[in-house]
Image (tube, rainbow, N blue to C red):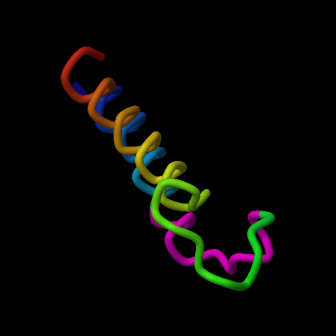
Amino acid sequence: MIGRLVFAGVFALLAAWLFVVPRHRIGQAEQRPPCWRNVRVWAIGIAAVQMAVYLFWG
């Protein structure tokens, strides 16, 4: 159980960092793209899926 929480916590920290990192650091232009082309949205979504995998099936 502790291992599940640790791995999920790592991805939670990654998602939090992705939320606050400036756009130029992730290679995205300054103008706001649509959600389906937004690198930040996809990266946070993938981190959330990884958290779910480790919490439920880990």
- Compared with residue 9, is residue 25 higher up or lower down, i.e. above or below? below
Instruction: Name the quarter where the N terminus is drawn.
Output: top left
Q: In the picture provided, is 50 more to the left or to the right than 1? A: right
The residue that appears at 48% across and 58% down in the rendered structure is 41
Residue 27 is situated, as x and y percent measured from the top left of the image, at: 80, 64
Residue 33 is situated, as x and y percent measured from the top left of the image, at: 59, 71
Q: In the picture provided, is 28 more to the left or to the right than 19? A: right
The residue that appears at 29% across and 37% down in the rendered structure is 5
Q: Residue furthest front?
A: 34
Residue 16 is situated, as x and y percent measured from the top left of the image, at: 46, 66
- Compared with residue 29, is residue 46 higher up or lower down, i.e. above or below? above
Boundaries of the magenta span: 16-26
Q: Residue furthest bottom?
A: 30
The residue that appears at 58% across and 56% down in the rendered structure is 37
Residue 8 is situated, as x and y percent measured from the top left of the image, at: 36, 39
Residue 10 drawn in magenta: no
